[in-house]
Image: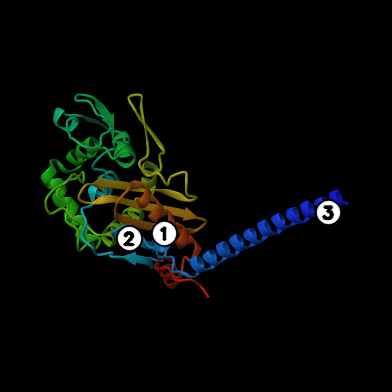
Amino acid sequence: MPRTRASGHALRDTDHGHTTQRRHFKCMVSIFLACLVILCALPCQSLAAMPVRAAILINMDTGAVLYSKNPDLAIPPASLTKVMTMYLAMDQIQAGKIKLGEKIRITPEVASVGGSSMHLRAGERVPLPQLLTGMAVVSGNDAATAVARRAGGNDRQFVRAMNQKAKAVGMSRTTFKNPTGLPAAGQKTTARDMALMTRAYLRAHPSALRYHNVTLFTHRDRKTRNTNALLGQVPGVNGLKTGWTVASGYNLIVTAQRGKTRMLAVVMGGTSRVGRDNAARRLIEAGFRYPASPKKIQQMFAGKRKR
């Protein structure tokens, strides 16, 4: 009998331990669920906020602005400038003033231009399409300078033409100082102006996208990936140009097409490459989700939830 009582005590002690563990587990689950409810009830500002100084999203087919944040804030364009340089070069090719198949001789001065480069060498003769691709893909300042001098005669004349074209397409808050986007006093633009420029550029020269959607660029056996990381990562993305300087932060123009719908996003003043790319990705996805509803997109990025 003592053995039986001892066994009974042992059994009751084990049951008590299991009961305590179950209560503890239920308590932890309750706390977790309560925290989850509280988190879900909070505004999603940290997730929804646009982490760049300025941004704009446009339906390229209708011209409707689907989202904007500080679209008229003055920011240095950095290498987004090269889109205008390519625009003018394509104008001259279209007009027959420059032949697309010609080769341009690289001067020592062009080869020594600093910053991002496609590593041109003095004395080499480079086909114009190769230079245009080098500008678009690796943001070559040397390539941009070579093309600008061929198209404009010299830097000053070409910059004058850049600013004339800017006014012609409605870029009222933009001033270009050079064809590369390298830092220069007074060089400025806005997200809205960059969107206006890009839309006009691609309307005039839709074939120019072939320079912007090259994912891997090769020059003299040197291979370089496109600085636009959204190419090949976000469905439909087919361009267009990145830019960065200390003063401007991280800038990006992105174009994309799914079916017959085309989107254009510009983000400027990002604090990191990843943040800039994520902001542009979210804008593009939002545009395709609500291609005709600015209100819904604005709500998405304001942290408001649908009820």
Q: Secondary structure at mark 2?
A: strand
User: Which quadrant of the view contains residue 50?
Assistant: bottom left
Q: Residue at x 53, y 75 (%)?
A: 307
Choose between 303 and 71: the one closer to the eye: 303
Q: Amino acid at mark 1?
A: Leu
**CA gap, disc 3 and disc 2:** 77 Å
Is residue 82 visible from the viewing direction of this image? Answer: no
| Label ID, residue 5 | 3
Residue 296: percent from left, percent from top: 45, 70
Residue 158 image offset from top left, x and y in percent: 16, 46
Q: Nearer the viewer, mark 1 or mark 3?
A: 3
> Which of the two residues, 65 or 211, is positioned nearer the viewer here?
65
Mark nearer the N terminus (1 vs 2): 2
- Residue 55, disc: 2
In the structure shown, which secondary structural element does the residue marked by tag 1 occupy? helix
Q: Secondary structure at mark 3?
A: helix
The residue at which mark 1 appears reads as 283
Q: Are marks 1 and 2 in contact (CB under 8 Å)?
A: yes
Q: Picture quarter containing residue 134? A: top left
Q: Is residue 166 left or right of residue 224?
A: left
